[in-house]
Image (tube, rainbow, N blue to C red):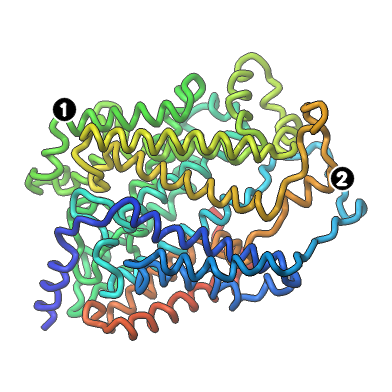
Amino acid sequence: MASDYKTAKESWVSDLTGSTVIHINFVSSVALYSILLYSSIVSRVPPSWSKKFLGQWIILVFPLLLSMTVYANIPAFLLFVLLIPASIAPFFPRQYVSSPLPSQNPMPSSPQSPQISPLPAVTIYRAHMMLMTILGILAVDFPVFPRALAKCETFGVSLMDLGVGSFVFSQGLVSAAPLLKNPSHLSAPAVPKILTITRKSLPIIFLGLVRVLLVKGTSYPVGTLSFAKNKLIYLSAEQEHESEYGTHWNFFITLALLPILQVVLHPVVKHVPVALLGILVAFAHQLTLSFLGMHQYVLHAPRVGIISANKEGLVSLAGMWFCQITGYLGLHLLGLSTGTIILPPSSKYFSRELRKLGHSRRNSDAQYIANALSAPREINHTAITLFSYTFVWWTLFYAMKYLGVGVGVSRRMVNVQYIFWVAGFNTSFILGYLLLHMAFHPPPPVYSQQSKLKVSANRIDIDLYQTLPVPPLFEAINKNGLVLFLVANVATGLVNLVIPTMYTPDPWAMIILGVYSLVLSSFAWLFRDKRLIRL
């Protein structure tokens, strides 16, 4: 019985070709529409309502679950349903938050340590990505989750394939923070930086090792308790798919090594724009696939040794063997480039500080950096710059697709089509969150309407705008994202251990998934005021 189920499950997850880019965009757009609905309601109800857990779960979490299950094949209908109440909301009066009194905003002590003001669009983007991850890793085990959204065997686009690259992109984005707080960090000795990053990566490395031990050393008659299931990568409850990364390699190891490889490139980042560097790495990786035989090696080489047994992980990590440049590193660098644009107050901040690097000690002064990072956010210019980068990534993606570079989108090989697709998708959605935030919370003026010169906005207005709350549930998810992900994996393993998910009827599957999402959201909400693990 168990053998038959295992064989059926292997067949169920094999040889999938995915969906279309437009379909994936429609399914994912539910995240944007749920934020539109939430913002429309919150701006017109008493502030206390926005802190109600159940209301946030219904508006922000449940639609995501519906979008990847029962409405996955008709996402436009779900978008229309969300748009109806959002369209009615403007007919009701808005609630206005009063500005705090000056006494409520004490002057910071001097000197200040550099801090980057949170950007709500980034917080929402990261929370949505984590939500779609923890929902997807269990939902994919049920037939209610369309096979078109499950990971592709070799070529194709799907929601699961997108999730892997999105984590790499997001990792690159947030890794911009140390460089923004201290641009001279680029010139610091490499060894201490590598040791620091390695220490912070130990939990991820540990997860990778646990995954190898559990999957390789444990055999259950019905299901494998996979505590370390990879992000949005489908690893069946009974069968590890070797074409994913290989026999021993896994995505956690890749995630742990990428920041170290970024440090190796710090001397180059000082002289080459990060976005250009990411493009160069991506094309260098593609050259190894197309002209050095790596494409055929990944697809056809037998797994007869430790190298060939893990060829997918090593190839996606090593775009060029002689310098260990990776396909994922190219995507990581594009995320880093995005972070240097949207995290600081000005999209030109990082490039401006790099030009000063080596010519002045000013940009290593903590007080100077603190003042620069606390300046009024030029969010309009940030949106325009982000739109420009988004346009470039989509243009490159469709150009590569039209020219047939890389044959097709391949998460398995992390080729250029995959890299530019993931970059274009992520910047598009961050831009969408940014525009929604600007629409509902217009920023204080940075430039005079008469002289067109930069003016000093009221400090209270700046502080109020830069601390505008995002959904509290999303803040809770981001605060303990790693722990939440671990709990999600344990829950996913337990469900697969006791339920033959592949044969579960859709109504029961939705009940299980609904309870699962509610429990995980409740866990995040319960510990919203406490960080459980500090890296």
The residue lying toward the viewer, choosing from 369 and 192, is 369
Residue at mark 2: 107
Instruction: Say which amino acid is labelled 2.
Output: Met
From the viewer's perspective, is the residue at label 2 or at label 1 nearer?
Answer: 1
Q: Is residue 39 above or below residue 256?
A: below
**Residue type at the position of mark 1:** Phe
Q: SS class of the residue under badge 2?
A: loop
Residue beneath the point at 65% across and 49% down: 438
- Residue 501, percent across and down? 26, 79
Residue 469 in the figure: left or right of residue 382: right
**Vertical side of 399 occupied by 239: above or below:** below
The 10 Å Cα crowd at callout 2, few under 14, some 14 to 19, many 20 or more, is: few
- x, y percentage for residue 523? 53, 74
Residue depicted at x 58% and y 54%: 123
- At horizontal 77% and vertical 27% (from top left) the residue drawn is 452
Q: Secondary structure at mark 1?
A: helix
Q: Residues within 10 Å of mark 1 (few under 14, many from 20)?
A: few
Which comes sooner in the sequence, label 2 or label 1? 2
Quadrant location of the N terminus in the rendered image: bottom left
Q: Which residue is mark 1?
A: 291
Question: Can residue 247 be seen in the rendering of this structure?
Answer: no
Q: Is residue 352 left or right of residue 317?
A: right
Instruction: Please give the label number shown on residue 230.
Output: none
Tell me where residue 107 sits by quadrant. top right
**Residue 475 appears anywhere in the view:** yes
Is 395 placed left or right of 460 in the picture?
left
